[in-house]
Image: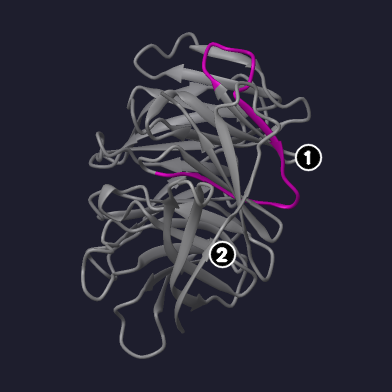
């Protein structure tokens, strides 16, 4: 169902930041948010997927500048709502998505609680906007789409990483066997032939997709590793949350980490690098759902905030915006990283 609906955020002072450089906006939804994901591509950067109980809401997010009559706010304009029968565990945007095309092309992938990987495409005929690519045999923890749209990568508790061919429909799925559950998977726009895969046992692998071999493996030396990320602004820098620690590494010098320090005392759950700064990371605590934005090299967080029921964490491609699902609210933080 197409919805031409827009709504403005409620603007709140952010009392948890440490340097008064951030602001918080809140958008309310009808049910719990399970995932939220900005498009990581320049041409579709304002698109945002929000996965609710039985649907995925797709729209554009824009900042309404402060003037003499109103405060600064963000506006979310719904473009389309896709029915989704199972709970969404992960979302990955396709590079094909575009808001400049007419009609707008909305294309993204989901992993759900039935262990299935699906492709949603607003240009499909009729009311069936999705296609099932395949499935794992256990929960899928992360998805990532190749910037050149050759493959979609997924990692699962079934201890595999699968690469689904996107241009050759019906082509053979590439399978990497892991030694523990796969927790994170990432491509990099500067290194499209390489794939980062992180395991719960603390191992971070770099695979060459052309040879289908691991070219680098790094041990975080902490367990459990719950999440890893590859800095969009520096292809040499990777980070993870393992145990209670934040670990940052330079893959060109893997013998010693750039930084290792405690970040969430009861364990970290998720990490995301800012797309515009290799030195800024957002993390979520595993049990208390505490959000922290930290600067590499500084023990004092730039921002801390308590979320309710956590559902997704994503940075805007260009704007200093970080969104996080908190029960039925999407909380958007304006965080200056330059």
Residue closer to the observer: 112 or 326: 326
Read off the residue under disc 2: 51
Up-down relation of residue 200 to residue 146 (above or below): above
Q: Is residue 115 left or right of residue 49?
A: right
Residue closer to the observer: 13 or 1: 13
**Of the image marks 1 and 2, the number of the one nearer the N terminus:** 2
Q: Quadrant of residue 289?
A: top right
- Nearer the observer: mark 1 or 2; the answer is 2
Residue closer to the observer: 94 or 22: 22
Q: Quadrant of residue 276?
A: top left
Secondary element under disc 1, as helix, strand or loop, is: loop
Instruction: Please give the label number shown on residue 287.
Output: 1
The residue at the point 39 percent across, 35 percent down is 275
Q: Is residue 103 left or right of residue 89?
A: left
The residue at the point 49 percent across, 8 percent down is 256
Up-down relation of residue 250 to residue 287 (above or below): above
Q: Residues within 10 Å of mark 1 (few under 14, many from 20)?
A: few
């Amino acid at each position: 169902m197409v919805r031409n609906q827009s709504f403005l955020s409620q603007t709140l002072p952010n009392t948890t930041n440490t340097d008064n450089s951030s602001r918080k906006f809140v958008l309310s939804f009808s049910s719990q948010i399970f995932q939220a994901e900005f498009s990581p591509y320049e041409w579709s950067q304002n698109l945002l997927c929000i996965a609710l109980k039985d649907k995925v809401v797709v729209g554009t997010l824009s900042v309404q500048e402060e003037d003499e009559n109103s405060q600064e706010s963000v506006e979310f304009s719904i473009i389309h709502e896709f029915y989704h029968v199972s709970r969404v565990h992960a979302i990955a945007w396709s590079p094909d998505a575009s808001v400049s095309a007419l009609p707008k092309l909305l294309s993204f992938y989901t992993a759900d609680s039935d262990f299935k990987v699906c492709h949603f495409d607003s240009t499909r005929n009729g009311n069936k906007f999705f296609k099932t690519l395949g499935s794992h045999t256990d929960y899928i923890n992360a998805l990532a789409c190749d910037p050149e749209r050759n493959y979609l990568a997924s990692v699962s508790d079934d201890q595999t990483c699968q690469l689904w061919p996107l241009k050759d429909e019906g082509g053979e799925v590439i399978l990497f066997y892991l030694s523990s559950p796969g927790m994170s998977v990432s491509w990099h726009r500067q290194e499209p032939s390489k794939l980062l895969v992180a395991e719960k046992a603390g191992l971070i692998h770099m695979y060459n997709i052309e040879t289908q071999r691991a070219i680098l493996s790094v041990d975080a030396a902490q367990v459990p590793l719950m999440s890893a990320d590859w800095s969009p602004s520096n292809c040499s820098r990777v980070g993870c949350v393992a145990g209670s620690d934040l670990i940052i590494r330079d893959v060109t010098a893997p013998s010693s980490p750039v930084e290792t320090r405690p970040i969430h005392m009861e364990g970290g759950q998720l990490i995301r690098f800012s797309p515009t700064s290799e030195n800024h990371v957002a993390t979520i605590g595993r049990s208390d759902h505490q959000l922290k934005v930290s600067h590499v090299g500084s023990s004092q967080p730039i921002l801390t905030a308590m979320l309710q029921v956590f559902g997704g964490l994503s940075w805007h491609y260009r704007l200093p915006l970080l969104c996080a699902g908190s029960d039925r609210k999407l909380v958007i933080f304006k965080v200056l990283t330059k």
